[in-house]
Amino acid sequence: MSQVTRQRRAITGTLASLAVAAVLAGCAATSTSFPASSSTATPTATAGGPARQASTTASCNPYESLPPQSGGPKATPGSWAAAIRARGYLIAGVDQTTYHFGYLNPLTGQIEGFDIDMIKDVAAAIFGLSPDSPALAQHIHFKSIDDAERLPDIQKGMVDIVAHTMTVNCSRMQEVDFSSIYYDAKQRILVDAPADGATAPDLAQLGAARDKVCATTDSDSVAQIQAAHAVAVQVTYWSDCLVQLEEGQVAGISTDDSILYGMQAQDPGTVVTGSALEDEPYGLGISKAHPDFVRFVNAVLAADRANGTWAKSYRTWVSATAPLPTWPIDYAG
Amino acid sequence: MAQALAEGRAGRLAVAARRESTGRTHWDRASTPGRLREVLAWLIIATLAWGGLATFTASQHASGAGTVVNASQPLVNDALQLWQSLSDANDAASAAILAGSLPPQAIVTRYQDDLNIARGDIVDAARRGGPQGDLDTLSTGLNSYSDEVSRALANNLLGYPVGTAYLRQASALMTGQLLPVAHNLYTIEDAQLASASAQATGLPLILVTVVAGLALGVAYWRCGRWIHRRTHRVFNGGLVLAGVVGAAAILWLAGAFLAGRSDLLTAQAQGTTPVTALANADIAVLKAHSYEALTLINNSGNDSNEAAFQAERTALGPAPGRLLTIAQHDAAGSPGAGPATAALTAAPAWFAQHQVVRDDDNGDNPAVAGGGTHQEAVALVVNGASGQAFQALSTDLAGAITADNAAFASHARAGQGAFTGLEPGIIVATLAMMAALAWGLSRRLAEYR
């Protein structure tokens, strides 16, 4: 979920263009695109993310992380991965309310989802197990945390890693390190599926009709809704928005498509619609004290992208049919 | 009457003359028969007046006691049961969601029973003339509530986390709107019970009646003296009989009042007062338990539910001026005293277990390898040590409430029983007194014909 700085909105088109140019120039040497197919993402959308993430105080590239450990993920002696292995379990800060990303499955009593798969892959690499191994469960301690706890928990060393639909942005990059991007969410809206043949309205149309649109309190989505002249209805949790939509109290929900897909899965009478409003690149949060662990995790992610593990998770949790999305994978240095 | 007696005294010198003056008319006020008629009329009027006052007094106290037993008590019971059922339903719904996609049948049954009881209480309270506005709010709100809980359970069964959002909404409706109305309803009914009880046990009216009765007795005595002086007869049978019947009526009235008052005050001391205090504690415990579950269900986001739990915990005590300590104090000497005292130790035991739950959930439990997990915390609450500690506390409070409710019912019934037959008894006694007066004085009057 995004908590974007207010400064972002102050950027003029000119500054944004300059930033795009700077970022593209700076990353050109090491930039790759993931996955290899680029059929679904337009160049402007791909480049637009970093540009809009730039702040007036520090220009940065959220799509850039430390290079992966060479030769694949190895818990080499003295590394943080080795320390975790010695401890016996990985401590992961996760969400348990976002369907299909990080949620407590009432059917199994287990925390599951796309974010959770990333954690399982990392733990499997640390402990030398298969991600599907039942033995893996005892090597992961999930700590359910809320949005506000993500950065402090990483900084205080209460968790080794955070997988929590966390958007990488410049201010967060000042506080913690991030892995390479493992999911590139877009801000979109969820509305009731229109009757046969009709087109679902986008945020601008909802705004023109002065409709009510739901978002969590003080989230970046609230500002977007208000900018579109729609009426923002603010709730505590994203799932509260789905209740509001189902009870007919709002006309739509505005947030990351990752969260909206999870809602759509719970209510087939809805549809994710509207043009992508903002890029919300998700990274795994890791303490700046453990750059070696960032490189370890990036090696895990790189291997996952290469061997289809990532695609399998995407097909399981995000979409069984949608084309695999693309975004730049940049490494510093 | 006093005037008649004074005139009697003034006319004492003319006694001999009057004895001979039989030729005067019967209605001559100065003659002895005239005086006798006047005295008879005054005494009968005074007796009738006192009889009316005594009947009114008896009816006031009897109807107060009757209202306590037949109207107020059932309404208070309905309101209390409604308030408790709603709190328990809210707790059971949270427990059901927390327990997993397919909650244990016992929890679902508990929830459904609570709703059925609550609906029955609303209907019953409406039939008995409870406040219509509150009952309408509760009736409508309960439908929305059960609707949202049904959606919560259905989504939970499908494995959809939106189920917890429905539960949150339902719980907010219950704690934010319905429980305050139910509490208000209970307060209103409880106040009406207190006022009915005060009517039945109030002192002023009965004191006035008894004093008036004694004054009537004095009047009988002085009339007796006057007749004695005029006629040289020691006793007037009618006056004596009226005096005896009057004395019996006063004794019955005072005795019934004292017995009824004592029973009703006991009903209050061992019933209403401790039950209200215990119910306040019980409902705070149920609220806290549902907040404990909501904390585990929501988990991510914020800690408002844990803060709400801590607020209820602080309100409960045990500490001077807190709910559990007040309940224990009020229940002292009542049948519920034992379990009410046991709750003072059961509560801290549960609070200690709650801390273990929080530590497990936060991964901060030093006693568990790795600091504990969310699943371990849930297991503790659903059927582990924490759940059992809560159950023990809840059982103590429910046991104390049941015992003191029974004490209230039996004492209130006994209080009402003390007034049985009093009203017609007083009316019959008054009629008998008037008849005796008429008989006794008319015999004297006949002697002048």
Image (spheres, helix red, strand yellow):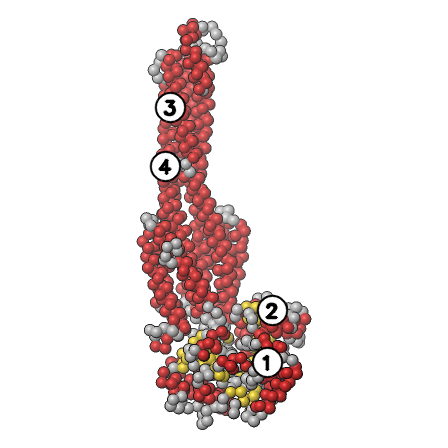
Q: Nearer the viewer, mark 4 or mark 3?
A: 4
Query: Mark 1: which amino acid?
Result: Thr
- Which residue was labeled with disc 3? B243
Query: Mark 2: which amino acid?
Result: Ala
Q: Secondary structure at mark 2?
A: strand
Q: Secondary structure at mark 4?
A: helix
Query: Mark 3: which amino acid?
Result: Gly
Callout 1–callout 4 Cβ contact below 8 Å: no
Q: Nearer the viewer, mark 1 or mark 4?
A: 1
Query: Crowdedness of circle 3 by 10 Å Cα count: few (<14), some, many (20+)?
Result: many
Q: Nearer the viewer, mark 3 or mark 2?
A: 2
- Which residue was labeled with disc 2? A232
Q: Position of residue B59 (x, y in %)?
A: 44, 35
Asked if one can make out residue B368 in the rendered structure from this viewpoint, the answer is yes
Query: Mark 4: which amino acid?
Result: Leu
Question: Which residue shows up at 43% across the image and 50% down it?
Answer: B77
**Badge 1 and badge 3 both on one subunit:** no
- Which residue was labeled with disc 4? B258
Q: Position of residue A135 (x, y in %)?
A: 38, 83
Q: Label 3, label 2: how many angstroms apart (C-alpha)?
A: 85 Å
Question: Which residue shows up at 36% across the image and 40% down it?
Answer: B262
**Badge 4 and badge 3 both on one subunit:** yes
- Which residue was labeled with disc 1? A56
Callout 2–callout 1 Cβ contact below 8 Å: no
Query: Crowdedness of circle 1 by 10 Å Cα count: few (<14), some, many (20+)?
Result: few
Q: Label 1, label 4: how many angstroms apart (C-alpha)?
A: 86 Å
Callout 2–callout 4 Cβ contact below 8 Å: no
Q: Is residue A174 left or right of residue B262?
A: right
